[in-house]
Amino acid sequence: MEHTRRDYRLRFFSIILFAVLTVIGTVFSVYLLLYADTLYTYTVAVLFLVLSLISGFFNVTTSYWYYRSFFYKEHLDGIRKALMPLKVLPTVAVAVPVFNEDPKTVERSLLSLKGMNYPKGKLRFYLLDDSDDVAIASELERFSKSNQVTYLHRGSRKGYKAGALNNMLKHSKEDFVAVFDYDERLTDRDFLVDTLPYFSDKSVSYVQTEKRYAKGNLFSDSIDLFDAFFFRFVQPARALNNTAIFAGSCGIIRKSALDDIGGFPEYIIEDTFFSFESDMKNYKSLYLPKVYAHGRPIRRFSELAKQQWRYNYGDTQFLKYFFSRRSEARKKRQLSQISGIEYMTHGFGLNYLSSILLLFTLASVLIVFSSFPVAHVTLNQLFLTKNISLDLEILGVGALLLSIAMPIVLTKLYFGSAKKGVMIFIVNFALAGIRARAGLNAFFNLNPKFKWSRPKLANKLNILPAIRNSAFEIVLASVLLVFGTAAIAVDNFFGGMWLFWYSFLYSSTFYFFYKYG
């Protein structure tokens, strides 16, 4: 399908939004620096400028990915035209790692995967079970024996998912390895028929397809769209450089490339580490923007929080790994400059979404209680147009409003739902503290596990677990509420409302834990 005029208009409109946000945020920071007259105000101004420059870098990078993604269709069409048909169908191992998950969900997924359109003699299914729950392990082993699935159980979780996959590689003799999550159900039986021809290029190590969740409620569908931005824009842009990220499932890997790389790096997010090592070995990778399986929708906020904790812990580990390996890559010319930037921004991604939000909140509090002119706008000045000038301080308000509007507008334009855009915006603040703590744990090599307090009764909401799970955010929201009240008490209406807004956003963590469990 060719791009329409609307596609091109949306492309340039979105890029302009990112550019405007970057410019006004930076100019406002410069304005603060010019007005600074004490050590306190200089410190605040420099902090805000640094944060604005970091945000600007990510805005520019996002615009780059977004712009490049529009050229991927033509690039993929060119690859398809050059494909050579496979003379002999290769053998494929379909691997499903699992750890203490509901057996019925696992079994339904495996049965759907066994319906792939491919010669049965060329397929072998593996259930990689690390469960330490005896009842779950027994049920999965019984199911595997009854359904011609190779059951591999480990006594420990050494290496996490990567360890389970590497253990499978010791037993697998197949030419390719396709990986699916325990809850992903096949929706298109032609997964192997469509992906395997791309491996006629011997330098391709893996093909990743689009990952999506099944339909659920407003919360779960919004989370699905959060991931959809990555698969719609980031993956195609990276694939143009032959460096698409392996996303952990719904993908297929050449076994000989895995052997050459040394298997999956045994980190908490093995997929990003594996993608990087594949690039370091000068393999190509490919992204196929088509959905072949749907994962179970994320309906519980605690489930999302655990996922994001794992992602950010792993991304922080990857950053340390990336910087330690970058000098070696430069010497051997194994990684292009653009690929290096892409991996760096990928590793910083969730750290940016968490730490920058928290630091902007701190900077906002410092500005409200400073001598900057913007910190002393009264209610009368705000609403009496004769007092509203074109002073640069208005840009601060514009940057704040645009940062709120952008995810909502873009979600409406591309996915037809402003409501889900609002949900995505608020959820990012609700997760900020969780992501930041995960990053700190990884930085200091602390335990990657984090247990969430759950209601005692199944499917029964309980306020106490919600309070325990969001204690940090409740304290933060309360402090901001007190500061906002203090600002209004000294007739700083704008500053007070600014802090009330942040208080509301961080208190949403408690709401999501209470509402969605």
Image (tube, rainbow, N blue to C red):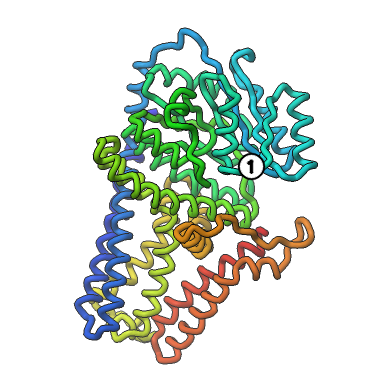
The residue sitting at the bottom extreme is: 490
The residue sitting at the left extreme is: 34
Q: What x and y, as percent, mark residue 376? A: 33, 85
Residue at x-position 31% and y-position 72% = 47
Residue at x-position 62% and y-position 45% = 297
Q: How busy is the neighbourhood of tag 1: few (under 14 within 10 Å), some, or many (20 plus)? A: some
Front-most of residues 409 and 128: 128
Q: Quadrant of residue 475?
A: bottom right
Of the 4 image quadrants, the one containing the N terminus is top left
Q: Is residue 387 left or right of residue 130?
A: left
Q: Is residue 68 left or right of residue 180?
A: left
Q: Quadrant of residue 68?
A: top left
Residue at x-position 45% and y-position 51% = 317
Q: Is residue 34 above or below residue 517?
A: below
Residue at x-position 52% and y-position 59% = 446
Front-most of residues 245 and 210: 245
Q: Is residue 371 left or right of residue 477?
A: left
Tag 1 residue: 296
Q: What x and y, as percent, mark residue 458? A: 77, 56
Q: Is residue 190 left or right of residue 395?
A: right
Q: What x and y, as percent, mark residue 230? A: 44, 44
